[in-house]
Amino acid sequence: MNLAAATNESLAEASNVLIYSSMAVYTLAFFAHIAEWVFGSRSKVGRTAAALSASSARASAAPAVKAQAGGTAVLERPEVITRSATGTRDVPDGPGAAGGTFKGDLYGRIAVSLTVVAFLVEAGGVITRALSVQRAPWANMYEFSITFSTVAVGSYLVLLALKKNVRWIGLPLVTTVLLDLGIAVTTLYTDSDQLVPALHSYWLWIHVSTAILCGAVFYLGAVGTILYLFRDSYENKLASGGTPGKFASSVMERLPSAASLDKFSYRINAAVFPLWTFTIIAGAIWAGDAWGRYWGWDPKEVWSFITWVAYAAYLHARATAGWKGRKAACLALVAFACWLFNYYGVNIFVSGLHSYAGV
C-alpha cells in the first residue's frame, strides 16, 4: 500500500493554513488581553488591605456583653473569619482581569470573542489533519501539541460558559498557546502521514485522548497554582504592614484571593487525577496488546508513573498537617513539571518504545 497515496494532501495543507490562521487570531486575542489588563490597572485598589485591616480589628476585639429579656447577660460572639484549607486569610476576590472598568471590560469581551474564534479555527485545523489521513490526530508530537492547545482553550471556554470566574486565565493561556503552536509548527512539525504499525489500535483514541485532556486540565491547575503563590505573597506582605508596588497592587487586586486560587487549583487537579490514573491503566492494557507485556519500565511508562506519584503526593499533602499552602502548591508545580518532561523530555531526548515524536 502506498502511504503517500493514502494521505489527502489538500486536507493536510488546509490543516496547516488553519493552524497558522488560528495563531494570527490568538495573537489578536493576546493584544486584546493586554489592553484589558492595562485599562483594568486604572481601577481602584486596596480591597485586600481594607479586608485584612477589618479582619485584624474584628479578631482583636473582645467579646461584647449584651442583655436579653429577663435581665440575663450573655456574651455576644465576635464575627468568625473563615480561612481556606491552607490558612490563607479570608479576603474578597478581585473583580477580574478588567478590574471593573468599562474599557477594561470591553477589551476583555473582545479578547474572549477572539479566543473563541481562534479556538474554532484551530479545532478545524485538528479535524482536517485527522481527515487527511483518516485517523486520530495525535500520532506524533506536532499533532499532540495542536490538539493539546485546542483542548486547553476549550476547557477554559467551558469554565467561562459555566459562569466561573476564570477570565484571569485568559492572558497566560493565550500566551502559552502561542508558544506551544510556535514550537509545534517550527520544531515539531511532521508531514501528515499514516501510523506506524504499533499505533494501529482503537486504544490510540482512548489512551492518548485522555492523556491530552489530563494535560490540558493539569495546565489550568498549574496556572492557578502559580498565581496563587504570587497572590499569597501579596496578601502576606499586606498583612505584615508592607506596601507592595503600584503595578503589583493593580494586578494582584484584580485576581481572585489566594484562598480562591488555591481552591480552584486543588479542585482542578483532584478532579482530573482519576482520569490520569485511567490513562496509565489504558496504556498498560494497550502495551499488553501491542508488545505482549503490560509494563516494561519504558521511559514513557516510568515518567507517567512518576507524574502520577507526584500528583498523588500533592493531593495527600493537602490533607496532611504541615504540608499545606505554599509547600503543597510547590509540590503541584513539581508534578506538572514531571508531566511536561514526560511529554517533551522523554519524547525528544530519551529513546524507547514510545519514540513517535517525528522530530
Image (spheres, rainbow, N blue to C red):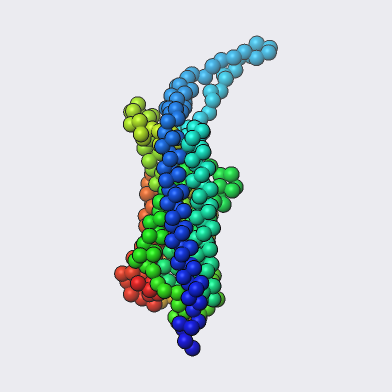
Q: Is residue 103 above or below residue 300?
A: above
Q: Residue at horizontal 49%, vertical 88%? A: 1
Residue sticking out furthest to the top: 71
Q: Position of residue 86 (x, y in %)?
A: 45, 41
Q: Is residue 255 visible?
A: no
Residue 164 or 328: which is nearer the viewer? Answer: 164
Classify 30 as above or below 290: above
Task: State the residue in front, 85 or 304.
Answer: 304
Examine the rendered structure and indicate whether residue 115 appears above or below residue 338.
above
**Residue 117 visible within the image:** yes
The residue located at (49%, 68%) in the rendering is: 14
How many numbered markers are drawn?
A: 0
| Residue at far right of view | 70
149 left or right, relative to 346: right
Residue found at the far left of this picture: 349
Residue 341 lies in quadrant: bottom left
Report which quarter residue 325 is drawn in. top left
Nearer to me, 82 or 193: 193
**Depth order, front residue of 247/93:** 247
Q: Give percent across and percent down for residue 256.
A: 48, 38
Residue found 50% across the figure and 50% down from its top = 114
Q: Quadrant of the C terminus?
A: bottom left
The x and y percentages for residue 119 are 51, 56
Q: Give residue 80's position: percent from left, percent from top.
A: 53, 28
Residue at the spot 45% in from the left edge and 25% down from the top edge: 50
